[in-house]
Amino acid sequence: MTTERRKNDRRGLLMILSSPSGAGKSTLAKRLRAWDTSIRFSVSATTRAPRVGEVDKSDYHFVSEDEFKRMVTNDEMLEHAHVFGNFYGSPTGPVRDAIEQGNDVLFDIDWQGAQQIRNSALGMHTLSVFLLPPSITELRRRLEARGQDSKEVIDQRMKKCWDEISHWDGYDFVLVNDDLDETENSLRKIIDVARMRRSQQPNLTEHVRQLQSEFQEQL
């Protein structure tokens, strides 16, 4: 099934991946985009200042706090949050345009953002997947093996992990990521099936009408 055929025949998905830190979310997101290059990352809006090398509308949509609040008030954000003194959110317009063109949009967000998107105007096009670690011991081992954080930061992440895990039952699918290749394969199957949901096929109604017209002609 080619990218061109998908764009002509279906709407895109809002694909949400959530997990506690260390459960493999970022790695699997990269693998999915390598598997299908039409999958796009959602570009968030933020009120924080750009860092060196960051490009507006590529890394983030950089906006003022007043503009951000205006967008929230006008329902122009699929989800938003206040984090460490700055606002972050997912603008609705670019996501709507992408899925109407048949492109899937990938969100790497927590359970609160996922809940907001599911309750949004585009919620019917959402596919949400939560990744569980095989054990808490293995989760800590993975965080330590990354070599990116101090012991204090790892301890903070571990304290937060249960709050994230406790929301596992709010997702369409839940996978235990004990083998990265097997989990990726399962994700691909889930996405392929979700792409065929009735809500993702805008031409079905017209096709059924055409069948009905042909049927009436033969009576």
Image (cartoon, rainbow, N blue to C red):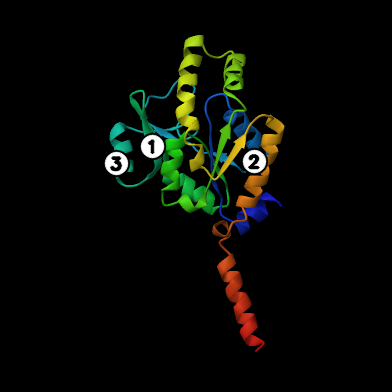
Give the label, 1 or 2, closer to the camera: 2
Rendered residue at 70%/51% (across/down): 2
Amino acid type assigned to the residue bearing label 2 in the image: Leu
| Sequence-first disc among 3 and 1 | 3
Mark 1 to mark 2 CA distance (whole Å): 26 Å
Say which residue label 3 marks: 70
Find residue 187 and name its label: 2
What quarter of the picture does the C terminus occupy?
A: bottom right
Task: Give the mark nearer the N terminus: 1 vs 2.
Answer: 1
Mark 3 vs 1: CB contact within 8 A: no
- The image position of residue 76, as x and y in percent, is 37, 45
Is residue 183 placed above or below 197 in the rendered structure?
above
> Secondary structure under badge 2?
helix
Image x and y of residue 146, in percent = 60, 16
Q: Position of residue 29 (x, y in %)?
A: 60, 34
Which image quarter: residue 33? Answer: top right
What x and y, as percent, mark residue 135?
60, 25
Q: Nearer the viewer, mark 3 or mark 1?
A: 1
**Residue located beneath label 1 in the image:** 80
* Residue 56 found in image quarter: top left
Report if residue 173 is visible in the image: yes
Look at label 1 and name its amino acid: His
Local SS, label 3: helix
- Badge 2 crowding class, 10 Å Cα cut-off, few under 14, some 14 to 19, many 20 or more, is some
At 58% from the left and 22% from the top, the residue drawn is 139
Q: How many marks?
A: 3
Q: Residue at x 32, y 32 (%)?
A: 64
